[in-house]
Image (cartoon, rainbow, N blue to C red):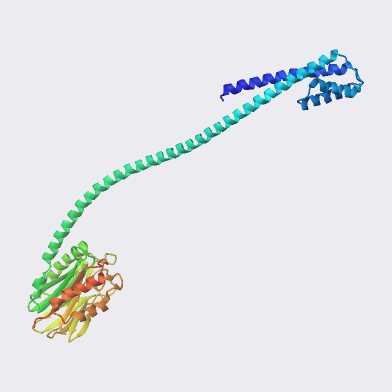
Amino acid sequence: MGRVGLGLQQKIIHELYANIFLKFSEIHKLIFTVVSYYQLQTFLESYKIFQSALYYMEHRMKGTYHKVLERQIRKFLGKEAVLPEEYLGLFLAISDTYKQYEDDRLLIEHTMDISSQELSTVNQELLRQKNALEVAYEELRAAQELLQESERIVAMSLELQEAYSLLEQQTEELKKVHVNHHAAIQRAKKIQNALLPTRHKIADYFQEFFVFHQPLDIVSGDFFWYAEVQHQQLLIVGDCTGHGVPGAFMTIMANALLDEIVNTNQISSPEQILDMLDRKVTLSLMQGKDSTHDGMDISVVCIDTQARTLTFAGAKHILYHVRQQTLHEIKGSIFPIGGHELPVPKKFQNFVIPYEANDIFYMTTDGYQSQFSPVYGKFLRRRLRETIMRYHNLPLVQQRPKFKFTFAEWKEDEKQTDDILLLGFKVNQ
């Protein structure tokens, strides 16, 4: 029901109430008229008759209203009291008026009942609409949040697309830089190989010879070097600080300095070579107390074929010598070449070994023994000695793949730790 219908119904109810009020007032007047006619003793007694008659008329709905009033008056006056005939009509008028009042009251109750039902229906409908609106509001709010999230995702997607485009661009630039860098390192490797002696050239001067050289990067900080001074052969193995390009630059410097010391100055004594090399490296790198520690560990072997001796001097290097199934270790000086200035003067010492037939010598950097295994840790010198004794009876040309296999088996999937250089030889008889 709309607001107009409800307003009209309320207006009708108000009019009915007003009509009943008027009729009820008339009943009151008629009753007081009847009661006053008999001139009852006091007003209080008249009021009691009126209240008693009114109570019965209101609560005995199916009775005849004038008879109720008459019976109450007779009850008060006595059964033998005679009421004039002209007041019987007055009683009938009271009964008709009250009957009209009762009819109007029933009509109002019926109207109000219908109105209550319609209002209940309207309330239920309004409640349903309210619930529907709340559901719609929640759905709208969820849709709005989803829209905001979608907008945020779209914004992030655009940012990611821009970032991806920038990343692609930077990747292409890095690829170009990498290609150029790789090409430069390859050229550096060619230069390094050109400056250092080849293993095939060195092999010609020994009865047997092998080199296992495996750089950590394309170029290496480990190097080997060979020269001849009169009737003596010089074989050098060095391990420069660092690896890769920095280590390779150090090897080039070492090659130039060794060429000056040995070939130009004709120095063949291993300890003198190390002493001069240390001074020249320190001078070249302008090293002092607070300078860098760049330098190298190195071993120098001088073979005198006339005296049939091998002289060794080392800077933090060891020479391994196998004779008649026995392994000997000749340890070099504890001092490196170059590096920080030390509080005591460096000292390098020659060790002279008269060599015999079938003697085998091994020179190596620390890369082999420093390699980590994913299970057993570092390889260490102990295992290097065991490996040398395991393979030394084989021809040296067959020892290289054995050492290489042992290294790979130990390393497994572990990253290579350092440059690897292991060199073995037998002196010509």
Above or below, 308 against 222 in this view is: below
Is any part of residue 367 visible from this angle?
no
Q: Is residue 400 visible?
A: yes
Q: x, y percentage for residue 54?
A: 81, 24
Rendered location of residue 34, percent (x, y): 85, 17
Q: Position of residue 243 (x, y in %)?
A: 22, 65
Camera-nearest residue between 123 and 333: 123
Write the residue at 52% across / 36% down: 131
Tell me: 398 left or right of 28.
left
Q: Quadrant of the C terminus?
A: bottom left
Q: Depth check: 206 or 196 in front? A: 206
Q: How many marks?
A: 0
Q: Nearer the viewer, residue 55 or 203?
A: 55
* 324 versus 29 height, above or below: below
Picture quadrant of residue 414: bottom left
Indicate left or right for 227 with 294 as reference: left
The N terminus lies in quadrant: top right
Q: Residue at x 17, y 59 (%)?
A: 185
